Amino acid sequence: MAEFSTLAAVDLGSNSFHCQVARVVGDQIYPLDSLRDAVRLGAGLNEDKMLDAACQDRALAALRRFGERLRALDRHAIRAVGTNTLRVAKNAPAFLKLARTALGCPIEVIAGREEARLIFIGVQHSLPPSKERRLVIDIGGGSTEFIIGSGFKPYQLASLFMGCVSYSRKYFPGGIVTRSAMKEAELAARNELQPLLAEFSSSNWQQAVGSSGTVRALAELSHENAAADGAITRQGIEKLRSTLIRAGSVEGMHVAGLRADRVPVIPGGLAILNAVLSELDIDELTPATGAMRQGLLYDLLGRVHHHDMRDITVGQFMQRYHVDAGQARRVGMLAQSLYRKLTLDATDADENDPTYLGWAAKLHEIGISVAYSGYHKHSAYILENADMPGFSRDEQTQVALLVLSHRRSLKKVQARIEGTADLRAVLALRLAVIFYRARTDISLPTIQAKYTGARFRVSLDRNWLARNTLTAAALREEMREWQKIGFELKIPELDPASATDAAVTIS
């Protein structure tokens, strides 16, 4: 990736959208500009998990404003991500097509644990360095993230489906706050927290830190109502809870300085925070200025400086699943070479495909650790469903599809790969696996390859094929597989009737 002096991060949260622009100086990031829009995307999610038209309009208007600010930046210097609401909305794919056009750059949807990792990076960069283990809590609009780590390394990550927007809508409709509603919301949050108690209780960390606008708003309210000095305490939150219940609504509290767009989601955020403090035995929670958008910037900086978390994750997966590194290297080098030949002079090739192909070559055999039979299916399932730090959902899907289609029937995966995976990359990986079936370094012939429309042409030395009859048989079967899905794979040296029909030589 090229070096950039300016980077930008866009966070499509369930409550607010944020755009942060920053200047890069060495390994440090300095803020230049920030934009925020209280879209409340989560509030537009109906019972059928569909985003309504009004919230989509608000979101697209905000993204168009962000897009104007980012227009002068290279698209590779921008990373935009969607979080919980876009993870669960059934019509998110259709909305994201419009959103990417409005913003003018790709938008990824990330998993909850990846969101937690990015939050931790952002928070840690905003705090003084410490060797202590920190618990970081981020109460968002649709989910709440929990991380324990030290330095910039998270050890425990979790994301729960509870947020200030969703809880405020469910338990405090119309902004009305009653004692019974508060108890019900707190009980629901406590139930959600039960699976985390063993790993996230106070014996596992030395300092508790809160991130997000909800935590900062509650810290401000606690200060106004309980004279707390910066930090959030159980006593301060309990006093704030009593004050809010007596008032009957946040509006009834008449708190000066609280942003109007934050008011409707305070009751849900308060219920969640009170449950968290109690269940995790937190006496004091320190608000932090860092958040996921800062984590996005530092993660993007790592990619620019060739410290890509995704490459680290791939390496960790290779170790975890005992991948034959030599075989992965052989397959990867040949697959990349074939892909370059198949896409020479192509105008429709995606610049990310070689990267996906490289990851797929390294990870295509991880399923063997589950069972050899159908291992490509096991590999693909792991890649599509595992927590892979640094990867978005779309990226995991792309790599998983390449892995799923690297062997056996193309017909069975045709519906999934057509239109979503580059078939040139699929063929390159399949051929590389065929040629290196012996799992050893061998002397390969010069391979020529070309792709035109629905027709592939691959040519290699006839004498080599005569000496390698197992590979020749596998290539004949490969030709039949492509024919089954309406593509022609022609290898003239395997067809005596068309021996003169050679592929165009591409060096």
Image (cartoon, helix red, strand yellow):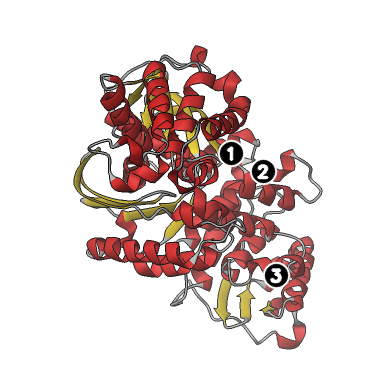
Pointer 2: what residue? 366
> Could you give the CA–CA distance between mark 1 and mark 3, rounded to whole angstroms?
27 Å
Residue type at mark 1? Phe
Give residue 127's quadrant in the image.
Answer: top left
In the image, residue 384 above or below residue 63:
above
CA separation, marks 3 and 2? 22 Å
**Viewer-proximal residue among 52 and 36:** 52
Number of callouts: 3
The Cα atoms of the two marked residues, 1 and 2, are separated by 8 Å
First-in-chain label (1 vs 2): 1
Residue 166, label in figure: none
| Amino acid type for the residue under numbered disc 3 | Gln
Q: Which residue is mark 3?
A: 414
Q: Is residue 130 left or right of residue 100?
A: left
Badge 1 marks a residue whose secondary structure is helix
Asked whether the beta carbons under mark 1 and mark 2 sit within 8 Å of each other, the answer is yes
Write down the quadrant of residue 218 in the picture: top left
* Of the pair 97 and 326, the residue shown nearer to us: 97
Which label lies toward us, 3 or 2?
3
- Give whichever of discs 1 and 3 has the lower sequence position: 1
User: On screen, 375 above or below 411?
Assistant: above
Above or below 354: residue 375: above
